[in-house]
């Protein structure tokens, strides 16, 4: 298995050389692209010594190297693995005169790339007929030889030359200062950068593109041109993205006082992209799935995702671009802050409680799992092997939760003061997490040093709470204890985290509030004592999920039912219902009488209470009345997991609920379906109440389909719907029932949407997660469909990731072929796109949690992958850790 050198935070040194300016020239042809890189470099005054000039590179062909207009001989430099080393003696050569004394020089490097063969989608590559770049984190070295590190900031000048017919649009991410036609039907454009930026924010796009254009006037009256580019046949899917961009710009001004700094903001949408989008200054490049949205082709959740990703990348303008990270150990510095900002934006645009519920569910399902596995790492780790494997839910989601802790301690006003100082002090600089902590402390004159423990320690803290009520003294006492399991990076006991626990005490008889406050747990153990409490209260803990921890408190069924009905915090009301459901599923799972499952009548009463409660929104009901997933239950069981049994129990409970409330679901469905829920032809507003009514209506449709074992009503909605939300929900319900209607609907959907890449991904995904006996044949057939392309990350995610993560009872059935199938795909992908192969391999992480048979089968496939020759560093690192 391939080994890669470990990089340590402790070894960080300032760069020996800096770059004053870089001039890039791209000459694009069908079979290759010539890149000329002319950069002015100089010795870093902060560096102790002048060393060899060491440049990074990856899979590019070197043609020539010039230093101060003199072509270098091979004796002047050497190439070792992924480094081009220009000797110190060459740089300080006496022949170079005064330039040598100042360690300054002009370095020109000419290289040859083949974008059409770049299946990794990193550096400069070709997506369909479109040239584009992705440079974060280490993609720029796949374009040219360079000091590819985020703390080397410089000004860019970019000249792009290409065939005018094939590539009429030539873009880079700065000011367009010149353009001209050339002989041979070629043309060029030149872009100049007025600000210093790291190379990971460089962007280039060339192709035959259409665009829409709008304008935004900032809070100080500056006019900003807004443009979104994509291929001509998709341009009609971009107006919603434009509206989302303008809302994001307005929100950032109002909430954080952040005004856009330039005269133009451009977005380009492409089909082949490893992630959601990239925040390159001025020129954001997007996965088309995160940019396209019309009522016919996108569900309500798709609209919400497009809006959120647009906002996220725009917010990076300040948290990531203007203030960037010093090194990749500080990656979370730009990502967590931007995730927090996009979460708050989404909450303001939609239902705040439901947004919080969805964010926490994602955190628990993915980040908590990461914390408990071999890839667990702190938010700012001490080392890494392959940086692409560091783009994790810990870096994104967990860090966003840390902002909630800052807010709980400093309140919103104090947090805003800290943010203002952070921007004011570090604008235009590459900084560290300590710099952010300093800004929060300085602005609020408060010691926050214990927050550093969240930065440095991996794992999910566990908070155990015990309550005691003394009838004689009328004292109610809460005892707190925190622990954190051992994680791979350390075997020493972790220091106590700083954990804010929002709580609410309620008199169970009068239902009046006794206390509503936040307790800060700073030590391993602590307690709270409440005096003069007349009755034993009911306490709601960790309201709004005030810290990313696991909470252990022995709630009785009676208390859970009480909180599900009467808690004034809707997030905790949701939690109480879900905890009750989990308890029932676990009790059935532990029952030795296989197939003799039970459901508590009290739970059904609770379900009915929420179903009929007129005081809560349909958005809350639509989230709450969905039973916990197989994944959530498996995380509670932790070892010897039987996914098939979990699936059977959940299926049993869904049928009981569906049959119990069949009439209510039908009435609810008809009532909501007959109201004005559908989109009109010319008007779509994602913020209207209809979005949530649709979701609740379609949940009722699912339950009614289960109760009647008929998909006829679902098929009727499928035929009549004029929006993708209703069409997709109907198709999902149809697939639940095995009959001729199912095959007919799938065929109709395929014929209708086969020319739309993003919609057809839904077709792949729905079948991948369906619970049918011949799913293996279905997957094989789908992989050979002419619309499936393994080189496209979206297709891989829609088919294989969907199956392995959302069809757990099939994936973990007592058959080796499923693990072998995924392992084969991972091996094949690794030769094309190591990043996507590495991410897909995460579905094999849980082999130790399975029963002995499945554990052995999965480990065998992991071992087989590890024996592959020329395994990429991306995949080699994670497989090594999976097997460890």
Image (spheres, helix red, strand yellow):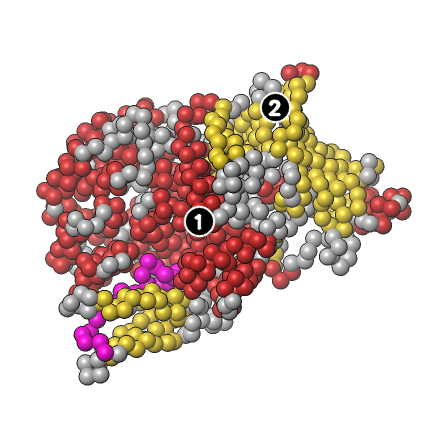
The answer to whether any part of residue 381 appears in the image is no
Task: Relative to 92, say whether 442 is above or below.
Answer: below
Circle nearer the N terminus (2, 1) = 2
**Callouts 2 and 1 close, C-beta under 8 Å:** no
Label 1: how many Cα within 10 Å (few below 14, some 14–19, many 20+): few
Q: Residue at x 56, y 41 (%)?
A: 261
Which span is picked out in magenta?
532-550
Q: Residue at x 35, y 63 (%)?
A: 550
Q: Nearer the viewer, residue 518 or 855?
A: 518
Q: CA distance from mark 2 to mark 1?
A: 47 Å
Label 2: how many Cα within 10 Å (few below 14, some 14–19, many 20+): few
Q: Nearer the viewer, residue 296 or 241?
A: 241
- Residue furthest front as drawn: 221
Instruction: Report the number of discs.
Output: 2
Q: Residue at x 60, y 43 (%)?
A: 200
Q: Which residue is mark 2?
A: 30
Q: Residue at x 39, y 27 (%)?
A: 756
- Name the disc covering residue 255, or none: 1
Q: Disc 2 on helix, strand or loop?
A: loop
Left or right: 560 in relation to 340 = left
Measuring from the top left, give residue 46's x and y in whole percent.
73, 57
């Amino acid at each position: 298995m391939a080994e890669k050198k470990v990089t340590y935070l402790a070894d960080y040194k300032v760069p020996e050389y800096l770059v004053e300016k870089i001039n890039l020239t791209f000459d694009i042809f069908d079979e290759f692209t010539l890149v000329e890189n002319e950069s002015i470099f100089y010795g870093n005054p902060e560096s102790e010594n002048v060393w060899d000039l060491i440049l990074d590179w990856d899979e590019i062909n070197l043609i020539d190297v010039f230093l101060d207009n003199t072509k270098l001989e091979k004796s002047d430099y050497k190439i070792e693995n992924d480094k081009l080393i220009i000797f110190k003696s060459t740089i300080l050569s006496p022949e170079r005169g005064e330039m040598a004394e100042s360690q300054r020089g002009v370095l020109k490097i000419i290289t040859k790339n083949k974008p059409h063969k770049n299946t990794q989608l990193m550096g400069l590559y070709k997506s369909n007929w479109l040239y584009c770049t992705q440079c974060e984190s280490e993609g720029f070295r796949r374009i040219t030889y360079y000091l590819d590190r985020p703390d080397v900031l410089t000004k860019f000048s970019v000249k792009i030359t290409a065939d005018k017919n094939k590539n009429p649009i030539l873009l880079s991410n700065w000011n367009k200062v010149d353009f001209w036609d050339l002989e041979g039907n070629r043309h060029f454009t030149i872009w100049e950068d007025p600000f210093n930026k790291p190379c990971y924010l460089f962007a280039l796009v060339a192709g035959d593109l259409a665009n829409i254009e709008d304008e935004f006037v900032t809070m100080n009256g500056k006019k900003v041109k807004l443009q979104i580019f994509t291929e001509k046949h998709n341009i009609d899917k971009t107006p919603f993205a434009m509206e989302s961009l303008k809302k994001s710009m307005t929100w950032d001004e109002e909430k954080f006082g952040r005004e856009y700094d330039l005269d133009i903001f451009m977005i380009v949408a492409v089909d082949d992209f490893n992630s959601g989008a990239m925040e390159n200054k001025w020129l954001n490049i997007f996965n088309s799935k995160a940019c396209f949205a019309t009522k016919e082709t996108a569900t309500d959740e798709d609209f919400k995702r497009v809006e959120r990703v647009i906002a996220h990348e725009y917010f990076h303008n300040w948290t990531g671009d203007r203030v960037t990270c010093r090194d990749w150990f500080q990656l979370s510095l730009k990502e967590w802050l931007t995730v927090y900002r996009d979460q708050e934006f989404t909450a303001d645009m939609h239902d705040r409680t439901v947004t919080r519920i969805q964010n926490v569910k994602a955190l628990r399902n993915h980040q908590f799992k990461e914390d408990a596995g071999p890839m667990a790492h702190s938010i700012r780790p001490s080392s890494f092997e392959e940086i692409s494997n560091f783009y994790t839910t810990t870096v994104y989601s967990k860090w966003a939760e840390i902002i909630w802790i800052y807010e709980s301690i400093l309140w919103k006003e104090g947090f805003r003061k800290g943010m203002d100082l952070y921007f004011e002090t570090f604008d235009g600089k590459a900084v560290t997490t300590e710099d952010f902590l300093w800004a929060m402390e300085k602005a609020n004159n408060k010691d926050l040093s214990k927050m550093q423990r969240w930065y440095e320690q991996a794992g999910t803290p566990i908070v155990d709470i015990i309550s005691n009520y003394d009838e004689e003294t009328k004292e109610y006492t809460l005892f707190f204890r925190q622990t954190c399991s051992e994680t791979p990076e350390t075997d020493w006991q972790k220091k106590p985290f700083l954990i804010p626990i929002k709580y609410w005490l309620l008199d169970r008889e009068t239902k009046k509030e006794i206390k509503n406050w936040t307790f800060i747990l700073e030590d391993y153990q602590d307690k709270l004592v409440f005096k003069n409490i007349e009755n034993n209260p009911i306490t709601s803990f960790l309201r709004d999920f005030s810290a990313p921890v696991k909470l252990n408190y022995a709630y009785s069924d009676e208390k859970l039912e009480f909180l599900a009905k009467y808690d004034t915090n809707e997030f905790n009301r949701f939690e109480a219902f879900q905890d009750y459901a989990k308890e029932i599923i676990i009790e059935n799972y532990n029952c030795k009488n296989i197939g003799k499952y039970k459901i508590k009548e009290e739970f059904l009463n609770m379900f009915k209470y929420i179903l009929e409660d007129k005081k809560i929104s349909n958005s809350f009901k639509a989230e709450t009345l969905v039973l916990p997933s197989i994944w959530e239950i498996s995380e509670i069981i932790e070892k010897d997991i039987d996914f098939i049994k979990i699936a059977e129990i959940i299926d049993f409970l869904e049928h009981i609920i569906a049959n119990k409330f069949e009439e209510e679901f039908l009435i609810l469905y008809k009532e909501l379906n007959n109201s004005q829920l559908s989109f009109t032809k010319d008007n779509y507003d994602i913020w209207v109440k209809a979005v949530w009514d649709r979701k609740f209506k379609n949940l009722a449709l699912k339950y009614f389909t289960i109760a009647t074992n008929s998909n006829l009503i679902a098929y009727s909605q499928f035929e009549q719907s004029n929006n993708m939300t209703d069409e997709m929900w109907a198709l999902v319900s149809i697939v639940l029932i095995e009959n001729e209607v199912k095959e007919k609907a799938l065929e109709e959907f395929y014929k209708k949407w086969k020319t739309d890449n993003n919609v057809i991904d839904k077709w792949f995904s729905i079948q991948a997660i369906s619970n049918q006996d011949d799913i293996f044949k279905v997957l094989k057939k789908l992989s050979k469909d002419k619309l499936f392309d393994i080189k496209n990350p979206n297709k891989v995610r829609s088919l294989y990731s969907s199956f392995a993560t959302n069809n757990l009872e099939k994936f973990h059935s007592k058959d080796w072929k499923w693990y072998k199938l995924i392992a084969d795909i991972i091996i094949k992908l690794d030769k094309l796109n190591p990043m996507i192969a590495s991410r897909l391999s995460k579905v094999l992480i849980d082999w130790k949690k399975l029963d002995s048979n499945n554990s052995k089968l999965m480990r065998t496939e992991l071992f087989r992958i590890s024996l592959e020759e020329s395994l990429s560093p991306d995949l080699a690192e994670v497989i090594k850790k999976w097997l460890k």
